[in-house]
Amino acid sequence: AWQHRDSSHSLFDGIERLPPAGLWKITEAGIEKRCFWHVLDVLEAARIIGDRTSDDEHMARLEALIEDSVDIHCIADASIATACSSGVDSGLITALSKRFRPEIHGYVVDPRLGRSEAENAERTGRRAGVPLRRVPVDRNRFLELWPKAVWHLESDGWHASHVGLLALAEQCRTDGVKVLLTGEGADELFGGYKWQAESMRPWRAWSWPGRLFRSRRWLDRKFGRMRHAPFKTSTGNSSASERNLVLRALSPELNFLQTRIFDRLEPVTPLGDRAFLGACLYDLYSHLQDLLNRHDRLSMAASVELRVPFLENRLIDFAIHLPRRQKLRGRTGKWLLKKVAEKHLPRENVYAPKKGFEISSGFTQGSQGLLRGGYLRDALKWPAAAVEDLVDLAKRDEASRLRLVGMELFLRLNAGGETADSLTQALHAAAADARAH
């Protein structure tokens, strides 16, 4: 219903996965399940509000922590490389890894439709002295890898970038690279997502001069409602009934976690800062866990170990105790991280507008034809009259196309016994049929 899954769920009946920081001890007596780390167990709000460290001291500390982590993550007996986009996170990892692995090279996915960040990524490579290898992805390659990505993800493969990562991992395997360093985790830890900053906006009524125009009773009543949906990404921001519906039926653990994080940050003021920091912490569970699961599956599909230097214990501890001003200053997200990156990366890359990894919608155009007479219509009990409407929705809207066709591929692979190769042929046929009509 909400287009994401709790980390412990799978699409297979009777099968669950380990959640983040999950530890299972399996004996004859059964399975003992516990959690070996949780942000609420280590978060100290007093450290955040008591922070008097200067910007320069924070910058020096962060740079030293990242360097130490990259050094550790560069330890390998096998060939090692980096995934280097045009952004700050993977670019900084690439630049620093050169110190510990002088021979290191990087990879950048180069889509042959739409926008490619390869040229901007190579600007980072030149500045760092790290050669980059382009991984081309054209339409034929995309349709070849899409069913394979769904197979390895064991879900619908809801983002076109999954194919790009699988293409990169397969190129690593071809080149004999066994370890790939990436920049995951920086946006969650250091405040790089737009929705984190937007979480501050609903709390302006409590800031000066907004609170002058509201009664204390109104503010208290409003606070009582908002603490249960404190972030931009919270379900039921505008409707308590919608939120309660979700709490009763869908992902209750993740949704209750929002309030627990927000309450733990109670000493932090103003409330907008509290909401921003809470949104960053919540993303470790709602966004990052899904990201890491998908990326680990796709890299290991090609027997490549994906390493994430930002997610090192001391770096995590440092980041979750930074005050808001070190993460978001003015309109600049990841402020502190970007100040460190200025020393190592081209400035135009450091302060370029944030863009997710983009794959053109043209790669999937026409694939909606698979929804006619497939498995998904039966699984979701679509009325016959609605099928063409849903096909038309998938034709018009890329996100719907990826979700629906991705789930059709999942069902054909796992329930219909079809192969990835046969589905690639079916995708080509659907696209050709769409062009003919």
Image (spheres, helix red, strand yellow):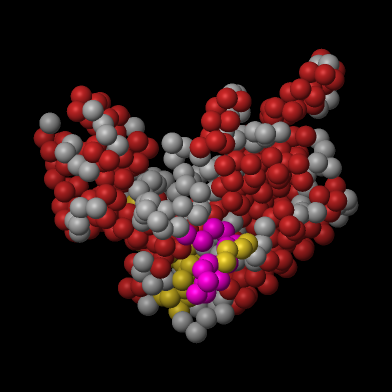
- From the image, which quarter does the N terminus lie in? top left
Find the residue positioned furthest to the front: 29
User: Toward the viewer: 389 or 163?
Assistant: 389
Q: Which residues are magenta?
A: 17-31
Magenta span contains residue 22: yes
Magenta span contains residue 147: no
Residue at 50 percent across and 78 percent down: it is: 103
- In this view, 165 is above or below 406: below
Decide if residue 76 is in sight here. Answer: yes
- In this view, 369 is above or below 240: below
- In this view, 142 is above or below 366: below
Q: What percent of the width, then of the height, locates residue 119?
A: 43, 54
User: Toward the viewer: 264 or 64?
Assistant: 264
Residue at 31 percent across and 58 percent down: it is: 151
Horizontal side, residue 169 vs residue 130: left or right: left
Q: What percent of the width, then of the height, locates residue 435?
A: 15, 36
Residue at 61 percent across and 28 percent down: it is: 237
Find the residue positioned furthest to the bottom: 77
Decide if residue 328 is in sight here. Answer: no
Q: What percent of the width, then of the height, locates residue 316?
A: 69, 60
Q: What percent of the width, then of the height, locates residue 362?
A: 29, 41
Residue at 61 percent across and 71 percent down: it is: 70
